[in-house]
Image (cartoon, rainbow, N blue to C red):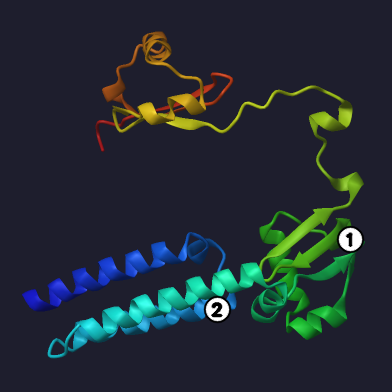
Amino acid sequence: MLRVLVRVLIIYVVVILSVRLMGKRQVGEMQPTELVITILLSEIATMPVGDTAKSMIPYISGVFLLAALEIINSFAAICSSRYRVFIEGRPVIVIRDGVVDQRQLKRLRVTVEDLSAALRDRGFFDISKISYAVMETNGKISALPKPEEAPLTPGDIKLPKKDSGMPVTVIYDGRVILKNFGECAMTEKKLETLLKKHKLSKEQILLMTVDMQGKENIIIRDRSV
C-alpha cells in the first residue's frame, strides 16, 4: 500500500512539473495538440500506479518526452505561421452584421443551437444585435455587438477617466505582502493608516487589495469558519 502511495506522489509531482514546463496556456486555452498531450499524459500517469512491479523510469521519461514535444510544437508554431495554421487552424467568422453564416457553421460542424448557447454564455441573447462573431481556434466564440448596442463608455462622451490600475493583494490571510507594494504605491506607513482608519489589525483580515488610486477592498476573516 505504501509503495502505491509513493508512486502516486511521484507521478503527481512529475505531471505538475510537466504541465508547468508546457506553460499556463495548457489549462486555460487548449488547442487540439494540447488536448491530445493532456489525454496522453493522464493515460501514461496512471500506468505505473496500477503496476507496481515495473520500474517508473520509462513512464516518467514518457511524461517528460510529451512535455518536450509540446514545447517544440509551440516554438514551431511561433516561428512558422504556415505550421501554426496547419496545426491550430484559423479563426472563422460565423456572424456578419447580425446574419449567421450557415455555410461556415456547416463546415465547422456547429449547429445554430450550439452557436446561440455560446453567445448566451457571453451575454448576447439576440443574434441580430451582433456585428461580428468569430469561432476562435480553441473553439471559443468572440462577439462584437453593433455600435448602437455597445455599452456607453467614458471615452464615448469625452469624459476623462484615470487608470486606477489592477487591484493587488497587500494582505492575505493576516500576512502583509510587501513585494506587491510597488504595484499600488503602498507603503508600510500608508497601510498602517488604512488599518487604523478601519479599526482593524492585519490578523483580522483574510484579504485586502488596493489599486493605484488607493481604493481598497477588505474581506474580514470569519472566525466561525
Circle 2 sits in a helix, a strand or a loop, which is it? Answer: helix
Across and down, in percent, residue 107 comes to 79, 85
Q: Note whether 120 is above or below 203 in the view shown.
A: below
The reply to whether dot 2 and dot 1 touch (C-beta < 8 Å) is no
Residue under the point 89% across and 52% down:
146
Q: Please tell me which of labels 2 and 1 falls first in the chain.
A: 2
**Residue 82 sits in quarter:** bottom right
Q: Looking at numbered disc 1 in the image, what kind of residue is underneath it?
A: Ser
Q: Note whether 32 is above or below 141 in the view shown.
A: below
User: Badge 1 is on which residue?
Assistant: 128
Whether residue 88 sits left or right of residue 103 in the image: it is left
Nearer to us in this view, 216 or 180: 180
Q: CA gap, disc 2 to disc 1?
A: 35 Å
- Mark 2, mark 1: which one is toward the viewer? 2
Counting every numbered tag in the picture gives 2
Nearer to us in this view, 150 or 15: 15
Residue count near mark 2 (Cα–Cα under 10 Å), binned few <14, some 14–19, many ≥20: few
Residue under the point 51% across and 74% down:
72
Whether residue 141 sits left or right of residue 100 in the image: it is left
User: Badge 2 is on which residue?
Assistant: 33
**Residue 150 sits in quarter:** top right
